Amino acid sequence: MMKSFKSFLMNVLNGSALGVIAALIPGALLGELFKALTPSFPALAFMTQIVSATNTFVGFAIGVAVAIRFAFNPLETITVGMTTMLAGGSLQFLESGLQLKGTGDIITMCVTAGLAVAVIQFLRPLVGAYAILVIPTLTVIVAGGLGRVLYPYFILITGKIGEFIAHLLTLEQTTLCICLAIIFALIIVSPISSVGIGIAISLAGVGSGAANLGIVACGFALAIAGRRVNSLGTCIAHFIGSPKLSMPNIISHPKLLLPICLNAGIMGLLASVFYIQGTPLSAGFGLSGLVGPVNHLNIVGWTAGNGLVTVLLFVVAPIVLGFASDYLFVTRLGWIDPENYRITI
């Protein structure tokens, strides 16, 4: 029974992680590039809107990816995708109609996708030839309805975490930066939205910069440590897209947090020393879409010196730390097995 539940949970988490990455990658790769080129090439404005809009379909992507992990047929897969999208929070019901806004709440999406899978598995042997009529209808009503009811309560979790982090803002700058970098490195490999936290507490200035560098440290640490067992594209997705791709691995093997926390703490210290800046809207992105470094340069100025510092801290330093921590925890101490980083897509 316990083994069956663990297998179910890991399928949901693996599917959720893949869905998040699939929906965020287009905007992460091309969003800032298209924005920069649009003044010179106005036709790209349309493409900017398209790649940015994929962020709002995280719920559908998670639902589809989770269903595929359970080897569902096309009807069941579409049903899980719709149900997760309806409950996830990006689809808002207004008096004037429906509105797509933001990514939604990932915790709600994970839970709703799991509920939808459970409902479909329960209904499948009962409905027979009436599957096309019963499965979409009952799954949307039962799992989607329950997910929508739970959505405000899951949002409260994010709010409480935000309140805790807000209390840290009274700390001395260096201590604050180290703490924020580690906390955001942990949040980015959980179902909680790092961007949502940053906006909720209006995290700006050096605190925002430290949060971004913590996420960057996490992404490079996972990418470098996983290079032995994962494809190059999967490794790159950790820092260009999101380290959430390794969320199931972290939950299965919590010791993977050791190099992440170490590297994030060091990057937080560097954020304080070099006074890396950010805004509430950029906090939580890390290197994804170049949002973190671009917003820092927008604040401090696009000079050669600032550009060099930005490259050193957002790329060079986390890569060096990634290889150093990999050597320490995998090669030298042997505390972590490289297989712990394997990702199945």
Image (spheres, rainbow, N blue to C red):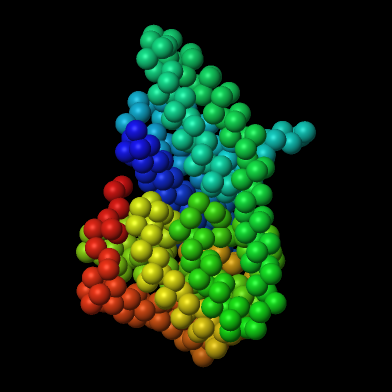
- The picture places residue 307, in percent across and down from the top left corner, at 50, 84
Quarter of the figure with the N terminus:
top left
Image vertical order of residue 134 relative to residue 307, above or below: above
Indicate the quadrant where residue 94 lies: top right
Name, please, the residue furthest toward the bottom: 305
Indicate the quadrant where residue 249 lies: bottom left
- The picture places residue 169, in percent across and down from the top left corner, at 67, 74
Image vertical order of residue 208 relative to residue 1, above or below: below
- The residue that appears at 77% across and 33% down in the rendered structure is 95
Residue 65 visible in the current orientation:
no
Image vertical order of residue 303 relative to residue 342, above or below: below
- The picture places residue 5, in percent across and down from the top left corner, at 38, 37
Name, please, the residue furthest toward the top: 129
Image vertical order of residue 181 relative to residue 23, above or below: below
- The residue that appears at 52% across and 60% down in the rendered structure is 187
- The residue that appears at 69% across and 69% down in the rendered structure is 167
Pick the residue in front: 323 or 90. Answer: 323
Name, please, the residue furthest toward the front: 1
Pick the residue in front: 106 or 300. Answer: 106
Residue 80 visible in the current orientation:
yes
Indicate the quadrant where residue 246 lies: bottom left
- The residue that appears at 70% across and 35% down in the rendered structure is 93
Pick the residue in front: 37 or 268. Answer: 268
| 63 relative to 146 in the view: left or right | left
- The picture places residue 183, in percent across and down from the top left corner, at 53, 67
